[in-house]
Amino acid sequence: MESQQSSLAASLSPIEITFITGNKGKLEEFQQLLEGSELATHYKITNKDISLDELQGAAEFIAHHKVKEAAKHVSTPVLIDDGSLYFNAFNGLPGPYIKCFLDRLSSEEIYSLLDAYEDKTGYAQLIYAYCETPESEPQLFIGRCEGTIVAPRGEKRGWDPIFQPKGYETTFGEMKYEEKNKISHRGKAFEQLKAFLEAKASKRVKGE
Ligand SMILES: O=c1[nH]c(=O)c2ncn([C@@H]3O[C@H](COP(=O)(O)OP(=O)(O)OP(=O)(O)O)[C@@H](O)[C@H]3O)c2[nH]1
Ligand SMILES: [Mg+2]
């Protein structure tokens, strides 16, 4: 039975998903996560860089709207990645607005925003959102990583150099993608996305 199912799995064409992002770092981390998983057998993931409207509000709301928008642009199911960084002293900010800060301030300047606060803790959050068609209800997979905002160290990529995950002596900027992905907000969200996609592929193989 198992071997019948594995030969059926091999004969089925892979399910295509379009990952919509213009951010090369996100794409590289996602590809690295994919390489370490079985998903590549069942799915063909392609990338499109489409500029999507991102509303203001909570990250979950933004991701929900962003993936629905994305689904209108392509004929395959879509996936989006939405990242945010929260300073505990700022009660939920910058959150999803971290991109505006990164566009206008250096990492030193972002770190300095916390000068007046003793509490330098925060967390990184990542939402993978998946949507089958523009009419479908999106599925959200949320990963969080607790840490501390520190003076920048390591590669200058987004806010990686100022985020030191809890229990580690290095910032994300000093880690290789592989190392970061094992503990990161993105790695945690990916584990949930993977379980969802694996269950979907397995149902297809069983003809359910
Ligand atoms: O150092 C980082 N480590 C990360 O793990 C990470 N994940 C996201 N980001 C940055 O946070 C903002 C999110 O905004 P965002 O989700 O809208 O991304 P984006 O606009 O760059 O791409 P996309 O919307 O086309 O997918 C953008 O500035 C991203 O560069 C990160 N920075
Ligand atoms: Mg964006």
Image (tube, rainbow, N blue to C red):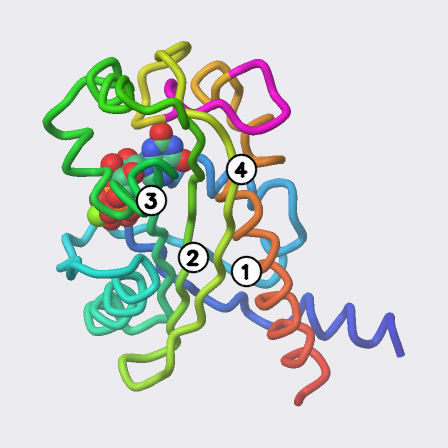
* Mark 3 or mark 2: whose residue is earlier in sequence: 3
* Mark 1 or mark 4: whose residue is earlier in sequence: 4
| Mark 3 → mark 1, Cα distance in angstroms | 18 Å
| Mark 3 → mark 2, Cα distance in angstroms | 12 Å
| Mark 2 → mark 4, Cα distance in angstroms | 13 Å
| Mark 1 → mark 2, Cα distance in angstroms | 7 Å
Ligand 1 located in image quadrant:
top left
Q: Amino acid at mark 3?
A: Ser
Which residue in the rendered view is the most extreme toward the bottom?
A: 208
Disc 2: which residue: 128
Q: Secondary structure at mark 1?
A: helix
Disc 3: which residue: 84
Q: Secondary structure at mark 3?
A: strand
- Label 3 CB, ligand 1: below 8 Å? yes
* Mark 1 or mark 2: whose residue is earlier in sequence: 2
> Where the C terminus falls, by quadrant?
bottom right
Residue 144 within the segment the image draws in magenta = no
